[in-house]
Amino acid sequence: MGGAQHPESLVRVHGDFLTHSVMGNTHSVSNSSRLSSKCADEAREAVLAFFRAPPGYTVIFTANATGALKLAGEAFPFKEGSTFVLGADSHNSVHGIREFAARRGAQVHYIPSTSTGGFVPSTAKDLLRTNRPLSSSSSSPSLFALTGQSNISNAKNSLSILEYASSLGYYTVLDAAALAPTSVISLTETPVDAMAVSFYKMFGYPTGVGALVVKESFLEVLERPWFAGGTVDIVQVPGTLVTRAPKSYERFEDGTINYLTLSAVTDGLRFLSAYLPFLPLRLSCLMHFLTSSLARLCHDTTGTPVVKILSRLPSRRLKTIGEQSDAGSTVSLIFLSPTGEMLPNSFIEHVATTQNISLRTGCMCNPGGAASLLGIQDFMGRLCSGVTLKDFETIVGRELGVVRISLGLGSDWGDVWRVIKFAEGLGKERKRTEWWDAWTEVPIGQAV
């Protein structure tokens, strides 16, 4: 589902901590506030250590990875002559930065996606070089946003492209929301200007907390469009004078941070650190078994495939601890009828629900990646202002989106086996007809 299963031990430890502690707003100096501040400081240090950040980085806590990307986008000093470069296979939270860029007169350029997501490195380098800042970065600041791993196509983009963009004068932002849960990221080896993460995707609990791991030098470049409680030291009222908070991260943490949960972030990172070295190897085995089993499934009446896998698959199975896969652990696919037509995703989701299986269907907030996987890029050009999803589906002639199966920290062989047996059922005429009849009898709107 794109979020990790929360570990029972993590919830138990955090619940015990809250039972025996009194926490207070960090914008005070009371004993309860001091404890909250201590937990926040420990969480910042844990985040920096987990991502192997060298000196000069700090951590800004946000509501989620989207909030972290918004902070970077809204405050980036785009202007006439600036450029914003991003991949087509990006989350909407990255695409949204183009609104800030366009309103300030910057040019927006997309790196095209391949048919299985991601981009061709040489194409990306050509586009970055062609649209590089024409003068110094201070007079025409430009931004490159990289999606480390696509949340729909499963493609991983090489982080080395960030160093190349930086050498051309771009500031760099890494969307690591899908990458961080199962991959080792070292900011010492990849000194990106800013990186967005979401902790519930990494270890399941708590929700409502993300972070922008960022160079303090990059924060000095940003121009916040407003101030709020917690971000300032002195505000002249009436008047126009404002003195920002003394610590750099405080200037970007609007209002009260989620102080009750930050101790769980520290414990969660410690929990994940114990498993992360082994996780890629384990997931590689699960992915190979899942995808090879699904690819072999055929309808019992026609012998045609039951599924069509659209997302990128790893090029090889991992064999040793410490290896990193060249793709993620997400499978995006569509289910096919015996005649080869796509079965409605709403039907698949309904049937999965009756089997107590949670699947994600749709475009996963990644329209560019979805269009590439489904081969409907040309239809994108026909869209006009005000178009809705229903309009788009009418143009294409079918439901849009894919079925996504996400493997992560809590996934085991039993989970994979149940999904395979579920897919086998869709290949059996009698069972599929039974499920279809039950679905069509559901009141309108309930299945969706």
Image (cartoon, rainbow, N blue to C red):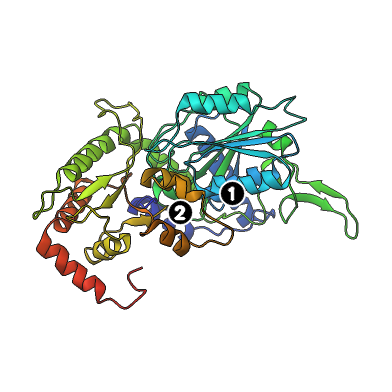
Residue 8 screen position, x and y as percent? 33, 54
Q: Give the image location of residue 423, x and y in percent.
A: 19, 54
Left or right position of 123 against 74: left
Report whether residue 370 is seen.
yes
Three-letter amino acid code of the residue under disc 1: Gly
Q: Is residue 50 left or right of residue 278?
A: right
Closer to the camera in the image, 300 or 269: 300
Which quadrant holds the C terminus?
Answer: bottom left
* Placement of 354 over or under 156, stated as above or below: below
Percent from the top left, x then y, of residue 355? Answer: 21, 63
| Disc assigned to residue 96 | 1
Please tell me which residue is depicted at 51% across the width and 54% down the height of the picture.
261
Q: Is residue 264 visible?
A: no
For the point 70% across and 44% down, the residue is: 75
Q: Pointer 1: residues within 10 angstroms few (<14), some, or many (20+)?
A: some
Mark in the foreground, 2 or 1: 1
